Image: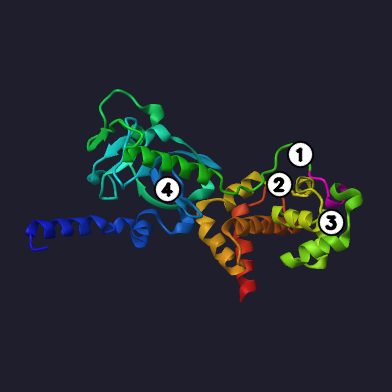
Amino acid sequence: MNDPSVADRLLELASQARVPDVLTEAGREARFGEPRSVQVQRGQVWRASWDDVSLLVLLLDVGDFDVTMAPVTLDPPAEDEHCLVLEPRGTAFGVPVTVWRGLQAELPVRVLDAVLDQWADELVNAADQRLEADAGLPPRSRRGTPILSEFDQAATVRAEILDDLDALRASPALPIESEGRSTPSLVNVLADKFNFEGLMTALIPLGLTQAEVMDIVRGYKPMTPAQALAVSESTGVDHELVSQAVRPLPADLVAKVQHPRFRAVWREHAARDNTDEAAAREAGAYGVLAMAARQTGSGPPDWSRRIEQYLLGSRSEEQ
């Protein structure tokens, strides 16, 4: 430690480890707005996460349910011949950035967690494998170098990225209704195996009242996938059969409740109800659907407004 060059190197490493102001919560809110108002757009770099898996991704196309993205890594340094490597000054991260163009793929919107950066079109186009050309790359960037051995660190990093992508795609999705598909009633599905006492035994522990169980039986209240699983376990009826009585959700509603702006809300509900994010989101989505069924009005439902109404009602119940 008496060698000045060692001390200088430690200071340099400490400086590199410091989070740039633009990446702090306050910095991100200054750039992109309050989290509940953030829009998902091409060119943004997001943290995608589910359970204990987390990955940075550059958005190349955005749909209602999926995004086309390219994985992004900062550390450890790793690349292959398909990568685009950016110098520290090119992004908000302040360190070299690797875009894995060869691993471009789709991910569900529901795993997007926090927006971290917005890149210029020139960089985004260069990072899009579909637009890759032999022309020169943008300033402060270069092509990656090939992986020479399966034992290289870069090969390990690439394999880990592929595993993370698989885990993110496997995150639980909500059932979406399809045109022409009708949902049979629970009575019809269970047929001669129908037993109201058995349904009460299955559903009352989930927080439903006897009247709500009756509404599910009559088809007035949609049954959720979690409730279908409880009914199957309680009655011994095959889960796949019981699931036929689960009413899928309107696509527009699913797109809203799976949007990243509501992830913090579902996590709060999960902590409150001692469950997980997927279960909290599912309960919220079916709660909104049930509330909409009780309301009247012409024209398509304003799902954003009804989600807010549902959340307001949930907060009132807590107080």
Label 3 Cα crowd, 10 Å radius (few <14 / some 14-19 / many 20+): many
Q: Is residue 134 visible?
A: yes
Question: Percent position (x, y) of residue 59?
Answer: 42, 41
Residue labelled with disc 4: 55
Q: Name the residue under label 3.
A: 217
Residue 283: x and y in percent read 66, 58
Q: Are marks 2 and 1 in contact (CB under 8 Å)?
A: yes
For image coordinates 53% across by 49% down, the residue present is: 110
The residue that mark 2 highlights is 248
Give the crowd class for mark 4: few <14, some 14-19, many >=20 residues within 10 Å.
some
The first of marks 3 and 1 along the sequence is 1
- Residue 232: percent from the left, percent from the top? 78, 53
Q: Give the range drawn in magenta.
A: 183-188
For residue 210, side relative to residue 156 (left or right): right
Q: Distance between the residues labelled 2 and 3?
A: 16 Å
Identify the amino acid type marked 1: Arg
Reading the chain from its start, which is encountered first: label 3 or label 4? 4
| Amino acid type of the residue tagged 4 in the rendering | Leu
**Which residue is label 1 attached to?**
181
Q: Label 2's element?
A: loop
